[in-house]
Structures are given as structure tokens and as C-alpha cells.
Image (cartoon, rainbow, N blue to C red):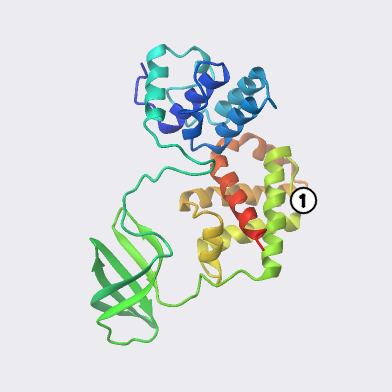
């Protein structure tokens, strides 16, 4: 048995490995995986576009680039795990609901979600600089909103920009800044950029400098929230986690350098694949591309 409890991703890896060698069926196992990459590997094998040997090679590559994240499963023992560890992994997976490809498990049971319209009673306000910050409570969470109007309000309505589950904070915007639509010209640029980025993942073809710079601007918009469409963009990317966005910024900066022929950046990209949450990045880019191509 594993020396420590298997992580969710380790369980997914083991289930996929068992599937591609014919030990477990697709239904009840692969259809419950979050990992986009693992599902792609399994689907290619299921559809006959990859042989079992191809799938095994792909899994060897998958675990190699993520070797620093996995403790129980390593490149050396993936194919020689004991039966109890394999059964532990399958138990974890079989308890999950069936997931559509790209769907994630809802791990947090919280009453709010980003973008939701709420109204809360104002308990106090604090004047800070040119803003008045309104503070109140709703369903056990502290709600905060700011406005330049400096009115005395008993209640306040707005939409949730983000949630801090750890500190049970809900941040509310009383204006439409952030959720304005993306201009058609920008949508076209984002569509092209996302296709180019996905192409890089598929074929290792470095995007053009223009597209890499646009990806850099996109990351900056997600982090700074300084564009009138920042939340619209965040939604199109399927609400990526801030820690993921930060890592994506690192790889996009390398892509900008690589698009100018920087060999060191190209080498770093090849060796740092496990550092930037590749699965989540692919998932976000696919969601963005799909959203930008909608008529």
C-alpha cells in the first residue's frame, strides 16, 4: 500500500495506466477523470488512434514531466505497483461522479460563486482615500464593496468579483466594470492567439511574437483586473485559479522570448513542463477558443 494517501492525480494516473493495459474498463474510471491530458491519452487508445504501447509511452512522458509532484507513483514504479495501491486508486476514482471532459469536481461547498448578483445589509463603512468601503455579512461571509459616491447606505447590491474561502470574504462590485463585453476585434485576436497556443501544446510550434505578447497581455489582465472586460475574459477561460495564472505568466514570458529565437528560453520551456499546470492551461485555452468562436 502507498506510504502516504494517494493524491487525486496519482489515483487518476494509476486508473489510466490500468485502462491502457486492459485491466479496467473505460466506464466508471476514465469517465471520472479531471485531467485533460490523461483523458486524451485514454481516448486515443479507446478510439484506436494510439496503440497500447503508444499510450504507455505517453503515460511515461506524463509522469516524467510531473515527477516532482508525485510521491507515491514515480517513473520507476508506475508499472510495478502492488495490488493494494492499485485498488486504493480505483476506490478513489469509483467514488466520483461521472465528469464531462474538461469538467472539474466541485470541491468546495460555498454559498456564492463569482459573477453572482447579491444584496447585503451594510453594517459599517470605512472611508479610504477616494473610496468608501461598505462592509456587511451574508450567510456567514463578510461582504466588501467600494464606491466613490460616499453615500450612507443601509444595504448594497452588486456582483461578486471574487471569493476568499479561507477568510470567508466576498468582494462585490457595484459597477459593470469588468463584465463588459469583449470587443469583436479583440475577440478575433484572442481566438487566433488561443489557437496558436493550443498548437504549441500539440506540435511544439512556437507562437509568433505578436501572439505571445497578446497571451502576456491576457495574463496581465487576469491578474490586474484593469480592463473593462476582465471578468468576461476570466469567465471565458473557465475561472482559472490565481496560482495557475501566476505560473502561466512565467511560461508565457518564456514564449515571448522564444518567439524571438531565444534558445535558452526554448530549452527552459522543454524542461519546465511540470511547473505551470499544463492541464489547466490547455483546459482554459480550449474554453477561451470555444467562447471566442461563438457567433
Residue 121 % position (x, y): 24, 75
Neighbours of disc 1 within 10 Å: few (<14), some (14-19), many (20+): some
Image quarter of the C terminus? bottom right
Name the side, left or right, on which 147 lies relative to 215: left
Image quarter of the N terminus? top left
Say how many tags the image has: 1
Residue under pointer 1? 260
Give 236 or 123, whichever is nearer the viewer. 236
Residue 154 % position (x, y): 24, 82
Furthest residue in direction front, as rendered: 27
- Residue for point 53% across, 31% down: 66
Would you identify the image quadrant in which residue 3 lies?
A: top left
Name the side, left or right, on which 155 lies relative to 163: left
Q: Considering only vertical position in the picture, is 48 above or below 137?
A: above
- Residue for point 51% across, 70% down: 179
Quick check: can you spot residue 265?
A: no
Would you identify the image quadrant in which residue 115 lies?
A: bottom left
Quick check: can you spot residue 45?
A: yes
Amino acid at each position: 500500500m502507498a506510504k502516504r494517501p494517494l493524491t487525486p492525480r496519482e489515483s487518476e494516473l494509476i486508473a489510466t495506466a490500468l485502462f491502457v493495459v486492459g485491466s479496467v474498463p473505460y466506464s466508471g474510471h476514465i469517465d471520472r477523470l479531471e485531467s485533460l491530458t490523461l483523458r486524451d491519452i485514454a481516448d486515443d487508445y479507446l478510439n484506436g488512434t494510439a496503440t497500447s504501447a503508444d499510450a504507455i509511452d505517453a503515460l511515461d512522458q506524463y509522469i516524467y514531466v510531473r515527477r516532482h509532484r508525485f510521491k507515491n507513483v514515480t517513473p520507476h514504479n508506475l508499472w510495478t505497483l502492488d495490488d493494494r495501491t492499485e485498488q486504493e486508486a480505483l476506490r478513489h476514482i469509483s467514488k466520483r461522479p461521472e465528469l464531462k471532459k474538461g469538467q472539474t469536481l466541485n470541491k468546495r461547498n460555498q454559498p456564492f460563486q463569482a459573477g453572482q448578483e447579491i444584496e447585503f445589509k451594510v453594517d459599517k463603512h470605512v472611508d479610504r482615500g477616494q473610496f468608501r468601503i461598505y462592509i456587511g455579512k451574508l450567510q456567514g461571509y463578510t461582504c466588501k464593496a467600494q464606491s466613490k459616491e460616499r453615500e450612507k447606505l443601509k444595504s448594497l447590491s452588486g456582483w461578486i468579483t471574487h471569493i476568499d474561502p479561507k477568510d470567508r470574504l466576498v468582494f462585490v462590485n457595484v459597477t459593470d466594470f469588468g463584465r463588459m463585453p469583449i470587443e469583436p476585434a479583440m475577440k478575433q485576436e484572442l481566438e487566433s492567439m488561443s489557437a496558436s497556443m493550443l498548437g504549441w501544446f500539440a506540435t511544439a510550434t512556437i507562437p509568433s511574437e505578436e501572439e505571445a505578447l497578446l497571451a502576456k497581455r491576457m495574463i496581465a489582465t487576469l491578474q490586474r483586473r484593469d480592463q473593462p472586460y476582465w471578468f468576461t475574459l476570466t469567465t471565458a477561460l473557465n475561472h482559472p485559479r490565481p496560482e495557475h495564472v501566476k505560473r502561466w505568466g512565467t511560461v508565457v514570458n518564456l514564449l515571448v522570448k522564444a518567439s524571438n529565437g531565444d534558445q535558452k528560453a526554448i530549452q527552459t520551456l522543454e524542461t519546465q513542463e511540470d511547473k505551470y499546470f499544463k492541464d489547466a492551461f490547455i483546459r482554459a485555452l480550449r474554453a477561451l477558443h470555444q467562447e471566442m468562436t461563438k457567433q
